[in-house]
Image: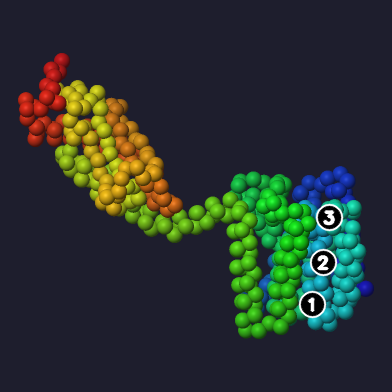
Amino acid sequence: MRPATTILIPACVVFLLGVYDDLRGARPWVKFAVQGAAGAMLFFGGLRILAVPVVFGARHFGSAVGLVLTVFWVIGITNAFNLIDGLDGLAAGSALFSTLVVFIVALVSHSHWLALATIVLTGSILGFLRFNFNPATIFLGDSGSLFIGFLLSAFALQGATKAPTAVAVVIPVVSFGLPILETGISILRRLINGRPVFTGDREHIHHKLLQRGLSHRQVVIILYAVSGVFAMLSLFLLWPGGTTLGLVLAVVGCGVWMGVQHLGYIEFGELRRVAVRTMEQPQVFVNNMAIRRALGELKVARDYEQVCNIVQAAFESNDFDSLEWTLESSGLGNRGFLLVPQRSDLLQFRWQRPSQSSGNDSQPSWRLQLDLLTAKGVLLGRMMLFRVYSPKALQLDINLLTTDFPAALADALDRTLPASVLAGVNVDAHPSLLRTQVN
């Protein structure tokens, strides 16, 4: 009778918590506190986690760490089954597969009391599921889902006391795969979005499937199949071999990855983009250094031709396809000479990547316009950067181009352009350059 009292007394505490939550509503911290207390009761009753061999090898933890791990396991599994209780029959059906796995493990481990307890729970769920399947006439509520989740977490701990290492650690995790997956995805999504973890939303796995046009029953049956696959894979670990554990974990990992990709969570698309960006970081570093090097060279450029060469060298290695700048006469007029826009070669500079020069300018592209404003506040003109549309991300820190670079280029042009223009141009022979009197 000791295993029964060790599990059923805290289970009744969790059930009463669920009843209160159904009737009055309980805050998350209250629910976690009560569930944590129930988990501590299991720990001091002898059902505890003192080792995780798959991760830490043969190392055994002390009582303090064991208590934390046990409470964490109980709270996690209890709330995982509560979290998937979003469609008629879903939580009960998923719990049915998990209970059958625990029952088989109990038989293999010769744990007769646990086998009896799980077969009783299996019969109860089957009888309940008859009326809970869509369209449901009875519902689990928080009292039912929390109670079932807690019992399964406790039964897994009970089975672990007599089962082999791999069975004790991995089988419960794999057999509870669907609720654990749902909980993990929900927490990660909300963290990525910067939202409180305990806020509800309609982005759960079953909601995503409903959004794809499936009916209520179709979604539940699909998720039953997923739970059945998790249960079947976990049973392979009853006869662990040299490669069985690795193969099962590989199959589970690949299946979860493909399933999550198929559901189309935008949060994981953003994570993938960040991961790709991280792998591309060395090239980003190289491109940024080219721009920073150009910033230093522009400060000491002696003539206009050198300025053009510096800019061209800076952009040849990055992802822009062409650039040009146009200088306004109003910004260059107070120097003794006024540049009139009849000679575009004196007012414009254009560079185009050789690979793009054979194409036409009608290719779809986006552009970035930068004002060439000097340190004295004089607007000399505008610089345009062009890039043909590509799925490849721009491997450059855009802040370098929108802050430091335009000012450095404007100052270099302000310093070098008048002398450069007049050094090689006969003013009398070119009507586009008109001498003016500076007052």
Q: Residue furthest top?
A: 439
Labels 2 and 3: the sequence-earlier one: 2
User: Which amino acid, mark 1?
Assistant: Val
State the SS at label 2. helix
Instruction: Name the spot of residue 62 as percent of width and height, x first.
Output: 70, 70
Residue 338 can be seen, yes or no: yes
Q: Is residue 92 above or below residue 240?
A: above
Local crowd size for mark 1, using a 10 Å CA cut-off: few (<14), some (14–19), many (≥20) = many
Q: From the viewer's side, name the closer residue of 114 and 235.
A: 235
Front of the two marks 2 and 3:
3
Labels 3 and 1: the sequence-earlier one: 1
Q: Check disc 3 and report the residue beneath it.
A: 134
User: Which amino acid, mark 3?
Assistant: Asn
Q: Residue at x 18, y 43 (%)?
A: 306
Instruction: Name the spot of residue 281 as percent of width and height, x first.
Output: 41, 56
Instruction: Name the spot of residue 335 as percent of width and height, x first.
Output: 17, 24
Residue 290 can be seen, yes or no: no
Q: Check disc 2 and report the residue beneath it.
A: 96
